[in-house]
Image: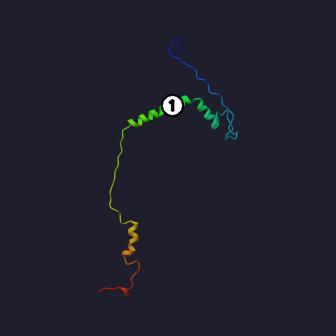
Amino acid sequence: MNQSDDVLISELEPLPRLEPSGNGSNGSAPKGSGSLSLSPFEVAQLIWAHRKPVARATAAAVIAFTIIAFLLPKHYIATTRLMPPDYGSNLQMALAMPALGGGGRVAEPAERVGP
């Protein structure tokens, strides 16, 4: 950009250089592979150091998603079917069958009463 532009450009402070800690790594990763391992305390410090941008991004996301939630149309379909009970597979009917059929025992020919 030219010096004549009316744009203010500011440099950001570089993040502090963190050395990888040995939390969980056995040292088998090759040196300079770019895998940076931070302890939970170091992550908390990093977030705390940049809490204003994190808070702004969080607030912006909450506001944006709240607006989207209220602007979306409310539509749903509820269907209900009332059907008579299926007695063919009803467990209660299956349990009641022996009582209806004479107690579940086979009648002997001598016990039959009839014309």
> Picture coordinates of residue 54 (x, y %)?
54, 31
Residue 45 or residue 25, whichever sits in front: 45
The amino acid marked with disc number 1 is Ala
Task: Give the residue at x 63% y 37%.
Answer: 40
Q: Quadrant of the C terminus?
A: bottom left
Question: Is residue 56 left or right of 92 when viewed as pictured?
Answer: right
Residue 102 vertical placement versus 72 (above, below): below
Foreground residue, 75 or 31?
A: 75
Looking at the image, residue 51 sits to the left or right of residue 78; the answer is: right
Circle 1 SS class: helix
Residue at 41% in and 37% down:
69
Query: In the rendered view, does 15 fall on the left or right side of 102?
Result: right
- The residue positioned farthest toward the bottom in the image shown: 110
Rendering coords of residue 55 (x, y %): 53, 31
Determine whether 90 is above or below 35 in the image. Answer: below
Q: Position of residue 28 (x, y in %)?
A: 69, 40
Q: Residue at x 41, y 35 (%)?
A: 68
Q: Which residue is mark 1?
A: 57
Give the image quarter of residue 14: top right
